[in-house]
Amino acid sequence: MWWNRESTRVQAAVEERLWALIQHWDSYANRAHSLQLQGRRPRGGFTAGHARNLADTLQARLDRRRGELDLELQLTNRLPDVVGGTVIVPQILLDQLATGHDETLVTYPLPNPGFPNTLGI
């Protein structure tokens, strides 16, 4: 179905984008940690701990987004559940039932007498 293709395309784009960011911050955290062990400060102002927190936050975001996309794949189209309804009964039928007349042909007056109005009920 088209939504499966679309969801798969979106999932691939999300994976690619977030995975690239996770790898970037993970690599930065490793480099910053090695520089901090040497007593030097890493460029960019981020410490190894901060970069690691960013990578972990992005990983959690990726996991959450994967779950959301998996739920989208489970969606199915189906008919709605009907929980109520209406029955419309013509007043003339109710009148016939109330009076006990069993007429099968009912005539209604029309504003234009040139057209007969007979309905078989």
Image (cartoon, rainbow, N blue to C red):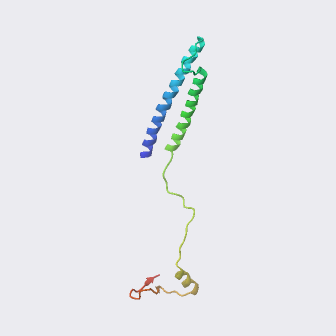
Q: What is the quadrant of residue 40 in the picture?
A: top right
Asked if residue 71 can be seen in this view, the reply is yes
Q: Quadrant of residue 117?
A: bottom left
**Is the residue 68 above or below the residue 105 in the image?**
above
Q: Is residue 97 left or right of residue 16?
A: right
Residue 42 in the figure: left or right of residue 116? right
Q: Which residue is at the front of the view, 118 or 41?
A: 41
Q: Residue 67, percent across and down?
A: 54, 38
The percent position of residue 74, horizontal first and vertical second, equals 51, 45
Q: Position of residue 51 (x, y in %)?
A: 57, 24
Q: Is residue 1 visible?
A: no
| Residue found 52% across the figure and 27% down from its top | 22
Position above or below: 9 against 26: below
The quarter of the picture where residue 47 lies is: top right
Residue at 48% from the left image edge and 28% from the top image edge:
20
Identify which residue, 61 or 4, lies in the foreground. Answer: 61
Q: Residue at x 51, y 44 (%)?
A: 72
The location of residue 77, given as percent across then percent down, is 48, 52
In the displayed structure, would residue 78 be above or below residue 85?
Answer: above
Q: In this view, which residue lies farthest toward the top?
A: 38
The tally of labels here is 0
